[in-house]
Image: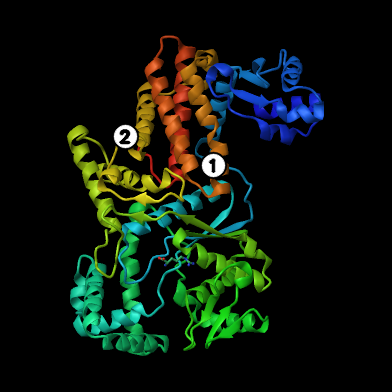
Amino acid sequence: MDIKLEIANRIAETANVPSEEVFSWFEVPPTPDKGDIALPCFKLAKSMRKSPNIIASELSQAFLGFDGIVKAEPAGGYLNFFLDRSDEAKKTVLRVLKEGEAYGTSDEGAGRNVCIDFSSINICKPFGIHHITTTVLGHSLSRIFKHLGFNPVRINHLGDWGTQFGKMLVAYKKWGEREKIENAESPMRELLSLYVKYHQEAEKDPSLDDEARAAFRSIELHDPENWELYQWFKDLTIREAKHVYELLGVEFDSYNGEAFYEDKMPAVIKEMQDKGVTTVDNGMTIVDLSAYDMPPCLILKSNGGTIYPTRDITAAIYRKNTYDFYKNLYVVAYQQNLHFRQVFKTLELMGYDWAKDCVHVNFGMISMPEGTFSTRKGNAIYLDDVLNKSIEKTKAIMIEKSPDLPDMDEVARQIGVGAVVWGPLYSSRIKDFTFSWEKALNFEGETAPYAQYTHARCCSVLRKAGEYDVEKADWSALDNESCANLIKAMAALPSCIESAAEKYEPYLISRNVIEICSAFNKFYFENRIMDENEGVKTARLAVTDAARTAIKVGLYLVGIDAPERM
Ligand code: ARG
């Protein structure tokens, strides 16, 4: 049993309070000289009718000769527990080694589906750097939920419906050449230049917009020629996006986007009307949300056209019917906060109690120092350019430093990609994020390449040492501060995974990975692993092995590969 649980149980017995409650009170002492676990005794002052100081010293008596605890020391209203470090080390290391890459898994989510709507790119638009956060965050969450036994359903809710396709169609028919686009290295960039040209021309000649509206209408009516072109735009976009997904190791279970719901909306709109959720205002069908301090949610334009919220409401109902989700997540920037509040409220008004299981996992904006991106002006930064640049840089370093590395291209991909995706995964998602090449290509300090490097270092130590027999470990060799810190950091991973899932915050894992790495590197410098004494050497190898595993698991969960050599 976890030592914390044992302590909680003993206190629960002595003080006559529920053990779970005690468990939730534990704190980490501010400095290591105050022990490993602290119990704030003022929490018990009311029920025990004594001062925290007295409670602390009384409770300490209950831990004399307690297995796994060296001492329980009252101090300033706290009871500080000093754990038996060798014992802790042994338990943690053996657990990690036993569970291996399944370290920290649970069956908490067994039989439960979690829909994760992420990446959700727009057709005919560049896969720009502004789509990095939703993509890597959603990818990471899908791995985290899977680790906890849930079944993630990864949905790329394509932005494949709307008047912009009319514009694209007009632009293509006026200035585009099929051959040239098909054979271009990047068809998307060709399409984008047409789109940019359209906007330049439309400023001079507003009648183009009428043409575009008519063109979109013809797509809505499935005009064979225009429908075929529209599908072709879609194929080109997805094909190109898949290169990026491949670099990132990202996969989807569904590419059902906005267009998919075209034929499913009429029934939902009728349902809303029948349930009296909608009203008509100035010819538009809306859901009045003034009672909830929100502007109305638009359902139908005055010309009868559907819009973004209509499709999301329909999609949510479809997902419930299809996947019977336990949670339905939308990994989308906070600019859409209002949109999702309106959608979820409308679902609730329709009588769907599962509206409470829909979560907008929002995140901060990504901007460039020079300002924000504009697709219309064509000043996008393409994600594949950023990734490729980082991979090239990695490869250049490798050719210089480790020219004989096997699988150099693959390792360069793993590290180059890791460096770039790290930024949005290393701080709370709601923080705004300024993109800079410098930051994206930084391999020093608290970065993915640093973690990957530490992992490769562990692998190298273990490779050189050859086989070891963990039975021979002398765990007392791990009774020092640098070891204790490493053990603590590794032992924390499972609870970091739990919290990351609960708060939809993968950075709780990436921070832990960095803690493990720094602790390992300190341990590595302060303890000679290949000691003459067999027991000491074995214990240190086993810790190294456990650190290797924990780092690998943590990196995997944030979507980053851990090469064995670099
Ligand atoms: N395509 C949208 C965008 O790029 C994001 C869609 C998010 N998902 C959704 N179900 N609304 O802004």
- Secondary element at tag 2: loop
Q: Is residue 8 left or right of residue 87?
A: right
Q: Is residue 501 left or right of residue 62?
A: left
The residue at the point 30 percent across, 56 percent down is: 383
Choose between 71 and 3: the one closer to the eye. Answer: 71
Above or below 304: residue 295: above
Give the Cα separation between the discs numbered 2 and 1. 26 Å
Choose between 484 and 467: the one closer to the eye. Answer: 484
Task: Give residue 511's position: percent from left, percent from top.
Answer: 45, 37
Above or below 450: residue 462: above
Residue type, mark 2 in image: Arg
Around disc 1, counting alpha carbons within 10 Å, would you say few (fewer than 14), some (14 to 19), or many (20 or more)? many
Residue that numbered label 2 is attached to: 565
The residue at the point 39 percent across, 88 percent down is: 217
Residue that numbered label 1 is attached to: 497
The residue at the point 37 percent across, 24 percent down is: 461
Around disc 2, counting alpha carbons within 10 Å, would you say few (fewer than 14), some (14 to 19), or many (20 or more)? some
Q: How is the image coloured?
A: rainbow
Task: Give residue 148's position: percent from left, percent from top.
Answer: 58, 46
Look at the image and tell me whether residue 16 can be seen. no
The quarter of the rendering in which ligand 1 is drawn is bottom left
Above or below 28: residue 505: below
Choose between 466 and 139: the one closer to the eye. Answer: 139
User: Of the residues under marks 2 and 1, which one precedes in the sequence?
Assistant: 1
- Secondary element at tag 1: helix
